[in-house]
Amino acid sequence: MELNKYSKNITSYGVQPAAQAMLHAIGLKKEDFSKPFIGIASTGYEGNPCNMHLNDLSKEIKNSIDLSVAVPLIFNTIGISDGISMGTDGMRYSLPSRDLIADSIESVVSGMSYDALISVVGCDKNMPGALMAMIRLNRPSILVYGGTIAPGCYKGKKLDVVSAFEAWGQKVSGKITDEDYDNVISKSCPGPGACGGMYTANTMASAIEAMGLALPYNSSNPAISNDKSQEKNIIANSIINLLEQDIKPLDILNKRAIENAVRLITILGGSTNAVLHILAICKTANINFDLNDFQKISNETPFLADLKPSGKYLMEDLHNVGGVPAVLKFMLDNDMLHPDCMTVTGKTISENLSNIKSLDENQDVIRPISDPIKKTGHIRILYGNLAKGGSVAKITGKEGTFFEGTAKVFDSEKLANDAIKNGEILKGDVVVIRYEGPKGGPGMPEMLKPTSAIIGSGLGKDVALITDGRFSGGTHGFVVGHITPEAYVGGNIALVRNNDLISIDAINNTINLNVSDDELSKRRNQWSRPSLELRDGILSKYQKLVSNASNGCITT
């Protein structure tokens, strides 16, 4: 088997002498030129706990690869911290960074003629971005998640980053002292690793493991743990095995693998961002999977995991009861998994699970099927005159399944945050935040700050929030996002006025503005698109290229 099918284009004798001279300059010898080149894409950078340890992890993986067999070479790509940018204009760059990551990894691996790829990722856009690149390249590849953060603690209560967001809501509503507020902030994030609950990073890591494109336990091993440290040797051996067997991402990824992933994150109560990202992954891989497929799986699958944000446990707790492999084993035993899907181990998912212990009967992180948190999934795809192209709700059952209230309309997240801070949001309100979609944001920022503030102020069960933006995996409450068409392109959410009656039905999966068609027609004639003052740059490019949320917000 020829392992250097791409790198040979620059390393074969007499073909590219200048390229070979440059390779000698980085320390390679002539005998290295016949070996496969493995690119290691690190999303490590110092400014974010999710990613601060990834450059070191990448070096550990590189040092574990047998240099007599292959040439490992580290390169870097970008990351944007959602937790740091949340509630600022910087959040508009978060979702666009997914496609930038994909573009940059594809560019380096193709441009440098690497034969294989290991992507080392942390914060949540890193993962789908890297996976989209892996699919485009279709060379032997493994995705490596840097792992979850350890929980913080204050006054005997486990904390995570969402605790800090919700503390702000408690502070502005007078429900927490300044001392407690400061302690929650300082103690919520104790070190490296991605957000601890079943938020977007852990959701996507779990989904990618279920797809077969990450190694078993990769998604649930904590960032700072012996288990995570020991992964490096398995990764090193596995990438060589993939090269030798010529197993590529498109040999692994198909509709059945996607269904495994979506069913897993339904059981786990994963982030609504997974809908956007999995749609984008499927578009990239030319897999026919859409919003209706999400709803079908959600209708058939119970929500079982008592994980944050709506539950009490963190990813570390899931790891301690067997991690994602134990949940997949549970699914296999209950006929909820396609068992024959190939994985990056070179084995099928059922073969990977053959020696995995079943979930302990005494654990309560994952509920039994006979006693679910919710009999059907938390992801609801809603349609109606407010979302003719679809929308996504996260309904865990704790919020109820129906909400009807009067609209309180804001043309930006900032205006909504100010209203919450000033106590202007009341029981029975449906908070409408618009012009925050993929084109109208632009960039489709997350609305974690307003949803957390609503929860923190004690209005979580009494207020709904709808938006053409999106939500963090840390969001909970009666919320609907990804409303399509968005306000900026003239979707009906642009026509909502204060005190309009809005009905949200998570049983029949509808979201409607209770205003006549004639009245909507009159309002449309009066509506004009707001102007956006955009400099030439990434957001301007993104606005021109991005698809709608129901198609994954892809830019290709």
Image: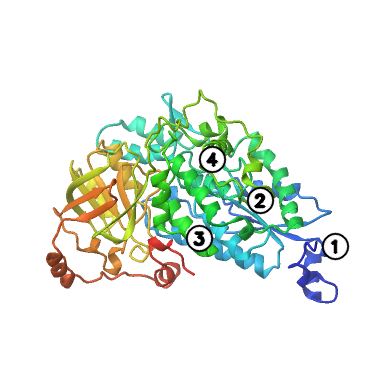
Residue under circle 1?
29
The extreme front residue here reads 335
Pointers 2 and 3 in contact (CB under 8 A)? no
Which residue is labeled 3 in the image?
282
Q: Nearer the viewer, mark 3 or mark 1?
A: 3
The kind of residue on which mark 1 rests is Lys
Which of the image's four quarters has the N terminus? bottom right
Secondary structure at badge 2 equals loop
Question: Where residue 148 is drawn, which disc sits there?
Answer: 4
User: At which x and y percent is residue 95?
Assistant: 44, 58
Q: Amino acid at mark 2?
A: Val
Q: Is residue 483 visible from the viewing direction of this image?
A: no
Alpha-carbon span between mark 1 and mark 4 = 39 Å
Q: CA distance from mark 4 to mark 3?
A: 26 Å
Label 1 vs label 2: CA separation? 30 Å
Please tell me whether residue 526 is drawn above or below residue 192 in the rendered image. Answer: below
Name the spot of residue 174 as percent of width and height, x first.
Answer: 25, 34
